[in-house]
Amino acid sequence: MRKMSLLALLLLIAACSKKEEKGNLHITGNINGLKSGTLYIEAVRDTTLMPLDTIKISGNSAFESHLNIESPEMLYLILDRGATSSGDDKLMFFAEPGKINIESNLKAFYADARIIGSKNHELYEQYRKVKNRFISEELDLTEKKLNAFRDKKQFDEAQNQAALESILKRKYLYAINFALNNKNHEIAPYIALSEIKDANLKYLDTICKSLSPDVAKSKYGKTLSAYIEERKNHGY
């Protein structure tokens, strides 16, 4: 009886170990139209993309991956189409522990992607929509300038430059406010580091000090704090 109890305990420990090995992030998804190819899930490590998982696709376009991440972070789903190639092969998604589902298709891998299961990614999409409006305004000004030169029309360079500077200020102000308004999510320090890294130190410091304790201890929270200290120590 004692031996049976010991055996049952060992089996239970083994089962728990297998579950732990699967990690804290379960990614499922489907790339409609993809019959053959390879998917890579990668993360930035010391400024370089490093592979976390490799998924071979052969016939079935559905995929899944089990990963372990220290805290919420931006990951990359990279598509290798095999025989064909395309510039549309990289998809960023803000991963966090739990279950995440990624749905897309072969024709518009990036544009048609739908990602659910991550609050940080949902917030990232909100930020990106507004950021794209600023980019569109900048492109409109550039187009007007090019058209004026092409048609040999008079062009007010000073006015154009002032308009560009105004867009830049609004873009930075939006990023700062977005980070402050989402201080309870890891997207806040990520935006500070990826979008406004060269902003006045007082704004970055304000964002850093506003972070919730859990976010401050996260990957991006600690990176932001270290970056601010580095700038203070080197006076830039």
Image (cartoon, rainbow, N blue to C red):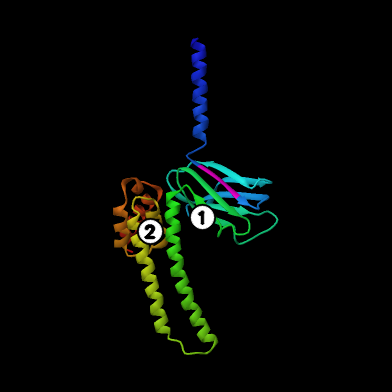
Residue type of the residue flagged with mark 2: Ala
Image depth: mark 2 or mark 1 in front: 1
The label on residue 54 is none
**Residue 155 image offset from top left, x and y in percent:** 46, 87
Place residue 196 in its image quadrant.
bottom left
Quadrant of the frame with the C terminus: bottom left
Residue drawn at x 48%, y 11% as measured from the top left: 2
| 132 within the magenta span | no
Secondary structure of residue under mark 2: helix
Q: Report the number of discs.
A: 2
Residue at the extreme top? 1
The label on residue 92 is 1
Instruction: Give whichever of 200, 94 is nearer the camera.
Output: 94
Instruction: Give whichever of 155, 122 is nearer the camera.
Output: 122
Place residue 201 in its image quadrant.
bottom left
Q: Which residues are magenta?
A: 26-30
Q: Is residue 119 left or right of residue 22?
A: left
Residue at the extreme right? 83
**Residue 8 image offset from top left, x and y in percent:** 51, 18
The label on residue 192 is 2
Alpha carbon distance from label 2 to label 1? 17 Å
Residue type of the residue flagged with mark 1: Met
